């Protein structure tokens, strides 16, 4: 078993000059994470989150085939229409949820599908004090062909594993999480996403929390995985597009060496102050910049894309530009990845797909030179949402759609392709049919 701290202390006492040891000193997070992800994907047996429970004896892996089912009374709640479901201050969840407990000493317990309802936690639970929480977000779609589909859920399951391990929550085989999600939507899909509502979706929220009821900064020895399914408003087409406000100079969402690339709750709470301020000024989301250079990173909890013409001196071609993943500042969005892959495949010759660092000054300069063509935010919640304006330090950068009110043709094309896959107008390997509903 490799634990962050065990590995570190062994290194310094016995082999302080070995290159491996030095690499771990320098790159501890990356090497520990890589090791555990490999372990979880291979001969995974349920242990290792840095809580020292599993010395020698086998602990149980997460096993979706053991799922127990306790069904809710199907007549107890009626399915509201979308507008009603999204009108209140509470998320409307479906009839059921899945929960599964984990203990360091024994591993994953039996997963349970049961009626949606409150969790029970001690006030001393790890998550409530040390933010040992991570989550995922994906949608289930009712296709125009009547079928229920998930979109690339293997990517969400793998990202969830990476996030859990980053905050010392227990690992699991990603396919087991995929099976649990699929089972839950197969159970609630027919009632909550009926065939009479093609083109609609529900939102799936898997999450994991550290539940050990002991104060003290340590990797939790108990955890809870839970999955809910709910309504979510359609956020992808606000009238006139979404307006972005760059973050205040004294605030940063994520930093090199931080955890911006993991979907951990700790990334979001601290961003709300800036978001609330931007909302009060009539903007939809923050465009998060990074460093003294002002690198453009993400728009709220979505990835950000801009379409511009390269400078004449650089060829003047049309480019679709987004921030790169390599410095681990931004979240590796499933939507982002899909847009990048579609653009490379289907827009070849028309637009050059560019993943690189670029600054807000470059955006302002492109605006001054009239080279900006389109911009959009991309993520599960906002889907593909056209951006109409970026406000930066007292200046407004108008994106063409801000003048016409029309979503740009490239944004529309990418969005259309994605929707066709999600709703079954195009049969594609990314659209995973839920067959057993
Ligand atoms: C969830 C999220 C995204 C979008 O990821 P998707 O997989 O496309 O939903 C982008 N940025 C942040 C910070 C996020 O939390």
Image (tube, rainbow, N blue to C red):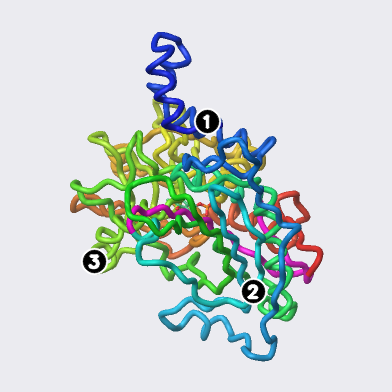
Q: Which residue is mark 3?
A: 281
Q: Residues within 10 Å of mark 3 (few under 14, many from 20)?
A: few
User: Residue at horizontal 24%, vertical 66%?
Assistant: 281
**Nearer mark to the viewer, of 3 and 2:** 2
Q: In this rendering, would 150 be left or right of 435?
A: left
- Quadrant in the picture for residue 415: bottom right
Residue 410: image location, x then y, percent: 55, 50
CA–CA distance in space, label 3 to label 2: 43 Å
Which element is circle 3 on? Answer: loop
Residue 228: image location, x then y, percent: 57, 68
**Nearer mark to the viewer, of 1 and 2:** 1
Q: In this rendering, would 381 be left or right of 280?
A: right
Question: In terms of sequence position, does the residue under pointer 1 or pointer 2 come before the other?
Answer: 1
Q: Which residue is mark 2?
A: 114
Q: Which residue is mark 1?
A: 2
Cβ at disc 2 under 8 Å from ligand 1: no
CA–CA distance in space, label 1 to label 3: 49 Å
Cβ at disc 1 under 8 Å from ligand 1: no
């Amino acid at each position: 078993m490799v634990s962050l701290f065990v590995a570190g202390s062994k290194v310094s006492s016995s082999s302080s000059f070995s290159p491996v040891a030095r690499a771990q000193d320098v790159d501890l997070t990356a090497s520990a994470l890589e090791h555990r992800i490999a372990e979880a994907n291979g001969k995974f047996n349920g242990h290792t989150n840095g809580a020292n429970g599993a010395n020698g004896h086998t602990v149980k892996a997460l096993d979706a085939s053991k799922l127990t089912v306790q069904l809710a009374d199907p007549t107890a709640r009626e399915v509201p229409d979308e507008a009603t479901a999204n009108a209140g201050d509470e998320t409307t969840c479906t009839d059921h949820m899945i929960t599964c407990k984990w203990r360091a000493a024994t591993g994953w317990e039996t997963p349970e599908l049961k009626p949606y309802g409150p969790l029970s936690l001690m006030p001393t639970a790890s998550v409530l004090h040390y933010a040992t929480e991570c989550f995922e977000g994906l949608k289930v779609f009712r296709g125009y062909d009547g079928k229920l589909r998930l979109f690339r859920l293997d990517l969400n399951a793998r990202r969830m594993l990476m996030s859990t391990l980053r905050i010392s929550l227990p690992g699991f085989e990603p396919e087991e999480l995929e099976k649990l999600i699929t089972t839950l939507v197969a159970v609630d899909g027919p009632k909550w996403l009926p065939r009479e509502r093609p083109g609609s979706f529900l939102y799936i929220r898997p999450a994991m929390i550290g539940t050990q009821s002991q104060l003290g900064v340590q990797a939790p020895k108990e955890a809870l995985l839970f999955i809910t399914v709910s309504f979510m408003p359609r956020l992808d087409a606000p009238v006139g597009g979404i307006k972005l406000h760059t973050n205040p100079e004294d605030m940063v969402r994520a930093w090199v060496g931080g955890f911006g690339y993991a979907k951990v709750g700790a990334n979001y709470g601290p961003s709300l102050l800036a978001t609330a301020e931007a909302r009060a000024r009539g903007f939809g989301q923050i465009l998060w910049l990074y460093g003294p250079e002002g690198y453009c990173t993400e728009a709220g909890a979505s990835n950000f894309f801009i379409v511009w013409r390269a400078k004449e001196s650089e060829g003047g071609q049309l480019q679709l530009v987004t921030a790169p993943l390599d410095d681990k500042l931004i979240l590796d969005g499933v939507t982002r990845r899909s847009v990048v892959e579609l653009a490379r495949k289907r827009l070849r010759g028309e637009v050059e797909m560019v993943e690189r660092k670029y600054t807000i000054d470059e955006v302002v300069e492109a605006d001054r030179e009239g080279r900006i063509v389109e911009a959009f935010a991309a993520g599960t919640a906002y889907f593909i949402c056209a951006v109409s304006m970026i406000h930066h330090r007292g200046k407004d950068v108008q994106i063409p759609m801000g003048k016409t009110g029309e979503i740009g043709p490239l944004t529309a094309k990418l969005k259309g392709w994605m929707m066709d896959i999600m709703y079954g107008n195009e049969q594609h390997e990314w659209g995973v049919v839920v067959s057993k509903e």
